[in-house]
Amino acid sequence: MKANILINKNYEIGKIDRRIYGSFIEQLGRAVYGGIYEPTHPTADDCGFRRDVIELVKKLNVPIVRWPGGNFVSGYHWEDGIGDKSKRPQRMDLAWNTTEPNEVGLDEFQEWAKRANTEVMMAVNLGTGTPDEARNCVEYCNLDTDTYYADLRRKNGFEKPFGIKTWCLGNEMDGSWQICAKTAEEYGRIAVETAKMMKITDPSIELVACGSSNMGMKTFVDWELTVLEHTYDYIDYLSLHTYYGNAKNESADFLCKCIEMDEFIKSVAAICDAVKAKKRSKRTVNLSFDEWNVWYHSKGQSFEPWCKAPAQLEDIYTFEDALVVGGMMMVLQNNCDRVKMACLAQLVNVIAPIMTENGGKAWAQTIFYPFMYASAYGNGSAMRTVIECDTVATEKHGDAPCIESSVLYNEAEHEIVMYVLNRSLTDEVDLLPVFEDFGTCKLTEHVELYCDDLKAVNDKDCERVSPVNVPVGDEIKLKKHSWNMLRFALEA
Ligand code: AHR
């Protein structure tokens, strides 16, 4: 098969906001307890954080991590997780039917974030929570005033404010599974009143309102329109969430899922702009794709109710999942004119690129690698491309292009970085990039993620799926069902 990609220096989509390489940690399963935090672990630091996990998180170079949920946040009272640990309550977590010990709360999580070189994207509870509780949290985190919550933070040992810039107004409030789920009217009202109070408290923060839980929700579009009608002038981003799976083992279609993700983004951007026009607003509301991943292997995983930190949502990712994640990453880059933040859901143990065993090893799942390379080299401007290529036949997506790609022009580093997924299950692709107006471009590196077995996985003792460097020559060949990163040096 053949694919030609034309890139012209003058045609840019937009600048990459590095926050699209964000992730997510929920107080759920072993994400926190046994994941980032395990005081008895041999690598634990003075706060009980696992250093081996922090090292892997640093390799992913995630600039922002959403916390504490997810569904969990809709029943969470942040004051349960601050101050003297011995006085903190153990609570029933109604979202996930477990017991939350509150050993790790806001005080600890912001410290972990610093140690992992990342920022916190804080979600407030708009299920059982109140607008007042949300604004108190902003004061606790961000203010230096001589007032109750700022004083309380200082009393708890934190003289300097945490400086949390980005805040989510609840989580998936349209979902019937959500604690205190709401109609769009109900949510729109509480979201705007909460937003007002939070921004009066700290005008420098940015707010994300909940969009639909996914594109398949019956209320999708109506939900967005109503929520934006209420909140447009007070928020900065609208959220999108999506998870894909391959339960029926239809790999050709599975590798096309990122096409659906692209449609989803473009639809939500259009909805935001429709409300902008209706309101005659000068402001643009951008998008926060704050939950995305493959999620299906662990559905139905059982555990004992109300226990602490059971194994929940522990998907073991295959090689083909890594291909899908790689493709989704490209879609986020190609929509960087509207998607300013995105969170791979999640980061450790719970549908995550990083796995651990309690008391033992930490390792990289298959999906770790396309994310790592996107975050490491996907900087600068995403470029428009003109692609001519062969197609692959699929059941649900018709004849789909044999490649998915994104192209980044990194002026500062004098390089062009190209990510390409060959979605053909049978054929190699000959790739011919054509660069216009860039001067001399020389291929310097070709990283390939390939495995003959689409269902291969990594575990603590054996890494079956890991990237390799392909020797570079005059031709670029992309193996069947492979993910690739190509780096081209430009003359300085
Ligand atoms: O990431 C797992 C769950 O998926 C989150 O808690 C929720 O927001 C979504 O439905």
Image: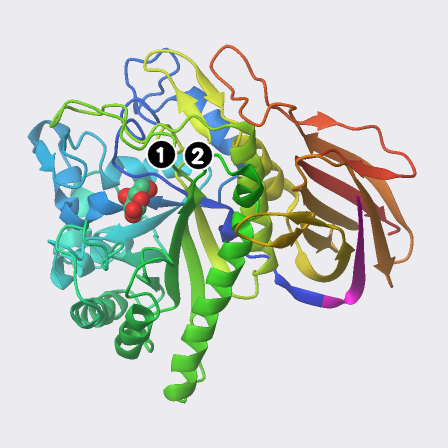
Q: Is residue 371 visible?
A: no
> Residue at coordinates 13% horizontally, 45% vertically from top-left?
79
Q: Quadrant of residue 239?
A: bottom left
Residue in front for this viewpoint, 204 or 132:
132
Mark 1–mark 2 contact, CB under 8 Å? yes
Q: How many marks?
A: 2
Q: Secondary structure at mark 2?
A: loop
Q: Ligand 1 shows up in which quadrant of the image? A: top left
Image position, residue 401 (x, y; %): 68, 52
Residue 2 belongs to magenta span: yes
Q: Which mark is residue 460?
A: none
> Residue at coordinates 45% horizontally, 84% vertically from top-left?
282
* Residue, disc 2: 116
Range covered by the magenta-colored residues: 1-11
Question: 417 left or right of 277?
Answer: right
> Residue at coordinates 75% horizontally, 27% vertically from top-left?
469
Q: Is residue 130 visible?
A: yes
Q: Quadrant of residue 310?
A: top left
Q: Quadrant of residue 84?
A: top left
Image position, residue 359 (x, y; %): 33, 11
Residue in front for this viewpoint, 276 or 359:
276
Question: 60 left or right of 10?
Answer: left
